[in-house]
Amino acid sequence: DTGVSQDPRHKITKRGQNVTFRCDPISEHNRLYWYRQTLGQGPEFLTYFQNEAQLEKSRLLSDRFSAERPKGSFSTLEIQRTEQGDSAMYLCASSLAIRGTEAFFGQGTRLTVV
Amino acid sequence: AQTVTQSQPEMSVQEAETVTLSCTYDTSESDYYLFWYKQPPSRQMILVIRQEAYKQQNATENRFSVNFQKAAKSFSLKISDSQLGDAAMYFCAYRSADRGSTLGRLYFGRGTQLTVWP
């Protein structure tokens, strides 16, 4: 297992377009998280899944954002009608559902909206 | 909500010297975890060290150690014998251990950019 994988690594899109990112967690991890990191800030929580169930969404996740995790495996994060303020690094992390275990992060997808 | 504060946007250290990065946090919970993550440029975030709040003993991982002061809600990271490869952004993070919360959700500080001079 090579760890958490995110695709694409970089995405440039025009304002108003839709984009979709993919995250493949570590295979045995049943928890999956999405975070957003803007320049000069720490990552901010967006949403989290336990298996295929989306258990919490941050207020940061507007109606233009949707995340799925079909069959509890990989996850996708879609942003509709992108805005310049959506430009950020989108990080995915996964962990086991065991007290005290750490989250492992992917390398992130850097989104630039022009 | 929990908040994590890193008051040092940038720090620098000479190779082989020791540096301490500061972190404070605010919570009403008694059971939680604290972490330091390292994020090199264009690289993924990796865990440096972890502290469980119910453990009084400070965590240590090789050249990395923490000074955990629960009453003061302080969690500093000490890097001894600094190496060029330690240069990165360091994030302090908090995670609740409360079963009623979003288990595993991390609250991050804004980070401290560490430069290591040869």
Image (spheres, coloured by chain):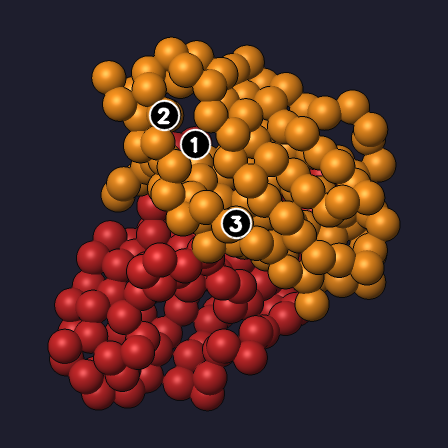
Residue type of the residue flagged with mark 3: Gln
Can you give x and y, in whole percent of width and height, for residue B58 in the image?
72, 25
On the same chain, marks 1 and 2? The answer is no
- Residue at mark 2: chain: B
Up-down: is B64 above or below B67?
Answer: above
Secondary structure category for the residue under label 3 = loop
Q: Is B113 displayed left or right of B33 in the figure?
A: left
Name the chain letter of the residue that bears numbered label 1: A
Mark 3 and mark 2: span between their CA atoms?
Answer: 17 Å
Q: Which chain is orange?
A: B
Q: Residue at x 63, y 60 (%)?
A: B3
Q: Which chain is red?
A: A
Q: Does the image show residue A4?
A: no
Question: What residue is drawn where x is 82% and y is 30%?
Answer: B55
Residue B78: percent from left, percent from top:
54, 25
Q: Which residue is mark 3?
A: B6
Residue nearer the viewer, B12 or B25 = B12
Q: Position of residue A52 (x, y in %)?
A: 59, 63
Quadrant hosting residue A88: bottom left
Residue B41: quadrant of the picture: top left
Residue type at numbered disc 1: Asp
Q: Residue type at mark 2?
A: Val
Q: Which residue is mark 1?
A: A1
- List the residue tagged with mark 2: B13
Q: Residue at x 49, y 78 (%)?
A: A61
Which mark is in front, 1 or 2? 2
Mark 3: give few (<14), some (14-19) or many (20+) Cα within 10 Å.
Answer: many
Using the numbered discs, state the Cα–Cα distance from disc 1 to disc 2 in whole angstroms.
35 Å
Q: Which mark is residue A58?
A: none
| Label 3 with label 2: CB-CB less than 8 Å | no
Image quarter where the C terminus of chain A lies is: bottom left
